[in-house]
Amino acid sequence: MLSKIDEVVLNNIAWCQIVCNTHGIVGVSKENIWGLHSKAPKFYPELITSNKCATIEEVKSFIEDGKVSSIKDSYANLDLALLGFDVLFEAEWLVHAPVLDFDPIQTNWRVVDTEKDLKKWTAVSELENIIKSELLKEHNVKIYICETEDGTLGFIANLSTGVVGISNVFSIGYEEEKLWKEIPKIISKEFPKRSLVGYEHGSSLRVAKLSGWKAIGPLRVWIKLDENL
């Protein structure tokens, strides 16, 4: 039986695979890692450890077969400095229980379902050429946007491994804490009785935790700046 953190990690890998698919990039699953043998889309890693049993030797072996400049150490338990990588940031996996009873939410929330709206969403979130229109065809992926007098906010939800992954959360001109409080209500309406998961770091992590999200474990993202990998 998977632990909650295992569910979160596998959901994140599923999301990364979906994004890579829209870029025509094929992922490879090994026993303890998932990865790419070619360059990942911007902001995405070429390798993710899929369980805490992954070893330096497995990572090294995968690296030798392709160009890897970014690694998500899902359990923050590998010293990848030994392979020439530097820590880009440390983060925490997050979980939020489904909301069974809640007050009304912002009526301006809607699911992005046209290329015109997606173009607007990617422009505001600064994710042009990363989040592609092919995602609109994914049944288990929902892209949300809310436009108010105060600003624009949004996020993406993906359903896999029995949980709903939340990613690409942004808030322009809107109080971030309110956004993190609204997300569980929106998702619990769309995907009833499903736990919400994701990860954040820095100020967004602090705000998410203040908004009722629970940190369940660390992760670490490593990069190698050497272009001659």
Image: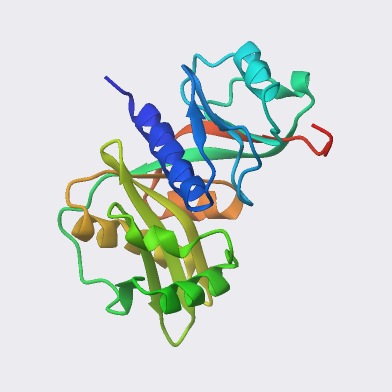
Identify whether 58 is placed above or below 152. Answer: above
Identify whether 169 is placed above or below 13. Answer: below
Identify whether 132 is placed above or below 151. Answer: above
Residue 128, how many percent across, how many down? 58, 66
Residue 22, how many percent across, how many down? 48, 53
Work out whether residue 129 can be spotted: yes
In the foreground, 141 or 166 = 141
In the foreground, 77 or 227 = 227
Task: Judge left or right: residue 154 versus residue 84.
Answer: left
Q: Residue at x 65, y 15 (%)?
A: 56
Q: Residue at x 27, y 78 (%)?
A: 107
In the foreground, 210 or 213 = 213
What residue occupies the far front of the structure in this picture?
Answer: 24
Task: Judge left or right: residue 224 versus residue 180.
Answer: right
Task: Judge left or right: residue 158 versus residue 205.
Answer: left
The quarter of the image holding the C terminus is top right
Q: How is the rendered protein coloured?
A: rainbow
The quarter of the image holding the N terminus is top left
- Image quarter for residue 225? top right
Residue 208, how many percent across, how many down? 45, 53
Total labels drawn? 0
